[in-house]
Amino acid sequence: QVHLEESGGGSVEAGGSLTLRCAASGVSHRTDCLGWFRRRPGKEREGIATLEARGDEEYSDSVKGRFIISKDSAENVLFLQMNNLQPDDTGVYYCATRRGYCYLILDRKYEVWGQGTQVTVSS
């Protein structure tokens, strides 16, 4: 059974950095896509970074160049390194997984979700 649990959220000033962690038990790193999503206040949930089983990464325009997705397959952990955070990055961040290819913009295709972790960026 797949279980995801995020951690690492918190409060940071604009320009700061945070690294989110998602403990991903039961995930097959040979076949499963892993992704990070967020829900910002007043906005719909959006995909921000995905990592294919074969290693391909994709980022939304809003985070490209600032965020980095990676994983430690041996430890079953997915990371999201977030740099140069801005107040507009404030929201709840979720990790999710699905069997097969990633879909950055189709969050409904993801089968298992974590509970989310809050990120707050102050100006």
Image (spheres, rainbow, N blue to C red):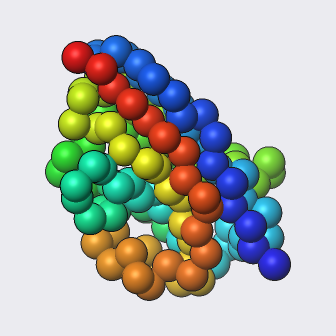
In the rendered image, is residue 55 in sight?
A: no
Quarter of the image for residue 58 reads: bottom left
Residue 56 shows in the view? yes
Residue at 37% of width from left, 44% of height from top? 91
Residue visible at 55% across and 53% down in the picture: 116
Instruction: Note whether 93 is above or below 105 in the view shown.
Output: above
Residue 21, above or below 4: above
Q: Give the residue displayed 46% in from the left and 49% down from the top.
A: 93
Task: List x then y, in percent, for residue 123.
Answer: 23, 17
Residue 28 point in image, percent of width and height: 72, 73
Q: Nearer the viewer, residue 89 or 76?
A: 89
Looking at the picture, how far across and down is residue 32, in whole percent?
A: 61, 75
Quadrant of residue 99 within the rendered picture: bottom right
Left or right: 89 as drawn, with respect to 70: left
Locate residue 100, reporting x and y percent.
Answer: 54, 83
Residue at (63% x, 48% y) in the render = 6
Most extreme residue toward the front is 42
